[in-house]
Image (cartoon, grey):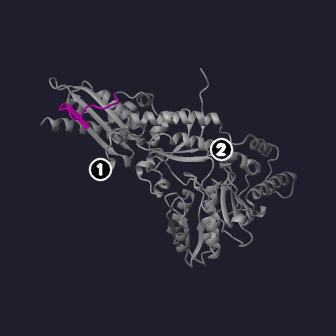
C-alpha cells in the first residue's frame, strides 16, 4: 500500500519546528540546563549567555534593542500582559482602549475582562476588505484613551493593517500603540522603530520555533513604556514578567528568528507564487468568493468561501490527507461561524462555507497540486449533495425562500 | 473529532442522493434548516398508493458530515416503511446508530424534522 499522503496547510494555526531550531535547542535540555537567573556559577552563565544571544536574534528581526524583549509563555500571555499591564500602569491618565472587532480572542477577551473592571473599550468595525478605517480610528481617540491595540496581520484572512499610518495617528495623539503581530513576525518585514510600534506581542510557534515561548516587545525610548506585571515572583524580565526563563524554548525562538531574518524574503516569494496558483485554480470554479484584501495581505495564505457548501462537511471529504481550517461553526466550540468573517459583513451562509488555507516553509508545489485537486473534488461532491446548490442552479432566488430557522 | 465508521461510510458513500418529482401527488417533500444556520436538509418520500408503503426516498443536504450521514441513514430507514412506521422514527435512534457526539445531536433532530415535514407534505397533498 502506498504511504498515505498527509499535507499540512494550516500554518496559521501552528508551524512545524524547523530541524535547525531543534538542533539549537537540544543542548539546553540536558547539558546546559542551568537557571538563567543563577548568576554565581557556570551553569547559570551558560543559560544566561544563551538567553542573551536569543534576545539579540529576536531584537534583530524586529529592529528593537535586546533590552526591549520580554519573554512570556506565548502570544496570549504577551497580549494579556500588554493590555492589562498598560491599563494598570496608566490608569491615572485614562481608562479608554481602542481595538478592532477582528482581533484575536487573546486581545478581545482581555479587553472584555478589563471592561468588567471599569475600563471603556471601543471595538472598531473593519471595512469589507478587513482594513481598519483610519478616519474612524482618529475619531475614536479621546483625551482618556491610553492604548490602541491593532493586530499586524489577521489570522483568518491575512489582511495586513496600515501599521505606519496607525502609529502616526497614535503618536500625534500621544496614545500608546500596541500590536498583536503573531501572524506577521518572521513572515513579512516588521520593524518596530521604523513603524512606530510601542508594544508588540508574538510567539515562536508561528515561525517554525517551539510552542510555549512568546515575546512582548516593550519600547524603552521614545516613549519609554512600562507595563505592570501580571505575574509576580522573582522580578525576572525587568520586573515585568516573573518566572524562571524557559531557556531551551527561548534558544529555539532566537534561532527561529535568525532563520526567518535570513530566509523570510525567499520563503515569502516562493509561497506567494504557490498561494496564487492555488487561489487562481480554485477560483476558476463557480461561485467562489475571496475574503480579505487582495493587496494588503500576507503572502502565504488565502481565505475562500465556496458557496452552497458547508465548510466542515467539505473538509471531511479530504481531511484524511489535507489539514486546513474552516470558518464553519461546526469546527468551532461555540457553534457560531467565524466572527472575523462576520465582521467583514459576510452573511452567516458564506462564513459557514469558508476555508482558510495557509502555506509554510515546508510546503511543496506538489502539495499544492494535490490540494487543488482534492478541494475541487470535495466541492463538487458536496455540491452534488447540496439542495441549495440545486436550487441555485434552477435559478431560484435563495433569499426569497422561506427557511425554517432552528 | 473522531467519527464512527458507520457515519464516515454514510458520508463518503451517501445512499439515496437525488431529487424526486415534487409535483407528483404521491411524493412528499420536507425542506428544513437554513443556510445561515449551516445546515439545510431536503428529504423526499414516494409512497406506493396501493399499499401505503414508502417505495423510494431521496435526500440532498447542505451541512456538516453528521448532517449528511443522518439524512442518508434516514432515507435508508424510510424505504419499505408505512407512513405510520416512518412517523415513529426518533432522532435518538439516529444518534445511537451513527454514534453522534453531543454537539452533533441537532443533526439528528433536523433529520427527524425532515421526515415529519415530508410526511406532512404527503398527507396535505392527499387530504389525509
Magenta: main secondary structure: loop
Residue A64: x and y in percent read: 75, 62
Residue that appears at 64% across and 57% down = A181
User: Given the current orientation, which residue lies at the most extreme top position?
Assistant: A1
Residue A117, above or below A28: below
**A59 left or right, relative to A176:** right
Residue A398: x and y in percent read: 33, 47
Stretch of the chain drawn in magenta: B16-29
Q: How many marks?
A: 2
Residue B24: x and y in percent read: 20, 32
Q: Which mark is residue A271?
A: 2
**A60 left or right, relative to A321:** right
Image mark 2: chain: A
Crowding around mark 1 (Cα neighbors within 10 Å: few <14, some 14 to 19, many 20+) is few
Q: Secondary structure at mark 2?
A: helix
Image mark 1: chain: A
Q: Is residue B1 visible?
A: no
Residue that appears at 66% across and 68% down = A227
Residue that appears at 66% across and 48% down = A205
Residue B57: x and y in percent read: 28, 29
Between A43 and A128, the residue placed more toward the observer is A128
Q: Secondary structure at mark 1?
A: helix
Q: Is residue A151 visible?
A: yes
Crowding around mark 2 (Cα neighbors within 10 Å: few <14, some 14 to 19, many 20+) is many
Q: Is residue B17 magenta?
A: yes
Between B24 and A315, the residue placed more toward the observer is B24
The residue carrying mark 1 is A400
Between A77 and A395, the residue placed more toward the observer is A395
| Marks 2 & 1, CB-CB < 8 Å contact | no
Q: Is residue A265 magenta?
A: no
Q: Which mark is residue A171?
A: none
Amino acid at each position: 500500500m502506498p504511504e498515505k499522503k498527509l499535507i499540512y496547510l494550516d500554518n496559521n494555526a501552528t508551524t512545524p519546528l524547523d530541524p535547525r531550531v531543534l538542533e539549537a535547542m537540544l543542548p539546553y535540555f540536558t547539558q546546559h540546563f542551568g537557571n538563567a537567573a543563577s548568576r554565581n556559577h557556570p551553569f547559570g552563565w551558560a543559560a544566561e549567555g544563551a538567553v542573551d544571544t536569543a534576545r539579540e536574534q529576536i531584537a534583530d528581526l524586529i529592529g528593537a534593542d535586546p533590552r526591549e524583549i520580554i519573554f512570556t509563555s506565548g502570544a496570549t500571555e504577551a497580549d494579556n500582559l500588554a493590555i492589562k499591564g498598560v491599563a494598570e500602569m496608566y490608569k491615572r491618565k485614562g481608562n479608554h482602549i481602542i481595538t478592532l472587532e477582528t482581533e484575536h480572542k487573546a486581545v478581545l477577551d482581555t479587553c472584555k475582562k478589563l471592561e468588567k473592571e471599569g475600563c471603556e473599550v471601543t471595538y472598531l468595525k473593519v471595512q469589507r476588505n478587513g482594513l481598519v478605517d483610519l478616519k474612524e480610528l482618529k475619531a475614536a481617540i479621546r483625551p482618556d484613551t491610553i492604548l490602541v491595540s491593532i493586530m499586524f496581520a489577521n489570522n483568518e484572512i491575512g489582511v495586513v493593517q496600515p501599521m505606519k499610518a496607525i502609529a502616526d495617528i497614535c503618536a500625534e495623539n500621544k496614545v500608546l500603540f500596541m500590536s498583536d503581530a503573531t501572524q506577521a513576525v518572521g513572515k513579512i518585514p516588521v520593524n518596530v522603530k521604523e513603524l512606530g510600534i510601542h508594544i508588540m506581542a508574538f510567539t515562536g510557534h508561528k515561525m517554525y520555533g517551539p510552542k510555549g515561548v512568546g515575546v512582548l516587545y516593550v519600547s524603552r525610548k521614545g516613549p519609554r513604556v512600562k507595563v505592570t506585571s501580571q505575574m509576580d515572583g522573582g522580578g525576572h524580565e525587568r520586573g515585568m514578567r516573573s518566572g524562571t526563563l524557559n531557556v531551551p524554548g527561548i534558544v529555539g525562538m532566537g534561532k527561529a528568528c535568525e532563520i526567518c531574518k535570513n530566509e523570510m524574503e525567499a520563503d515569502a516569494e516562493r509561497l506567494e507564487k504557490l498561494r496564487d496558483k492555488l487561489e487562481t485554480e480554485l477560483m476558476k470554479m463557480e461561485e467562489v468568493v475571496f475574503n480579505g484584501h487582495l493587496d494588503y495581505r500576507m503572502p502565504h495564505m488565502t481565505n475562500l468561501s465556496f458557496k452552497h457548501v458547508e465548510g466542515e462537511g467539505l473538509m471531511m471529504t479530504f481531511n484524511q490527507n489535507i489539514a486546513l481550517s474552516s470558518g464553519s461553526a461546526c469546527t468551532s466550540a461555540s457553534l457560531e461561524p467565524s466572527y472575523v468573517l462576520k465582521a467583514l459583513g459576510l452573511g452567516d451562509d458564506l462564513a459557514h462555507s469558508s476555508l482558510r488555507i495557509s502555506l509554510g516553509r515546508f510546503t511543496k508545489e506538489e502539495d499544492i497540486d494535490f490540494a487543488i485537486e482534492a478541494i475541487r473534488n470535495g466541492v463538487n461532491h458536496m455540491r452534488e449533495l447540496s439542495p441549495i446548490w440545486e436550487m441555485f442552479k434552477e435559478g431560484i432566488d435563495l433569499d426569497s425562500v422561506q427557511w425554517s430557522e432552528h | 473529532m473522531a467519527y464512527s465508521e458507520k457515519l464516515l461510510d454514510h458520508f463518503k458513500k451517501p445512499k439515496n442522493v437525488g431529487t424526486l418529482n415534487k409535483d407528483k401527488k404521491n411524493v412528499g417533500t420536507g425542506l428544513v434548516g437554513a443556510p445561515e444556520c449551516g445546515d439545510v436538509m431536503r428529504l423526499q418520500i414516494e409512497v406506493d398508493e396501493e399499499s401505503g408503503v414508502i417505495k423510494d426516498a431521496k435526500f440532498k443536504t447542505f451541512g456538516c458530515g453528521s448532517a449528511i450521514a443522518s439524512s442518508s441513514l434516514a432515507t435508508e430507514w424510510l424505504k419499505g416503511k408505512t407512513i405510520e412506521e416512518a412517523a415513529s422514527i426518533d432522532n435518538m435512534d439516529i444518534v445511537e446508530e451513527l454514534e453522534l457526539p453531543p454537539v452533533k445531536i441537532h443533526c439528528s433532530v433536523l433529520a427527524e424534522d425532515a421526515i415529519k415535514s415530508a410526511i406532512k407534505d404527503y398527507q396535505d397533498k392527499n387530504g389525509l
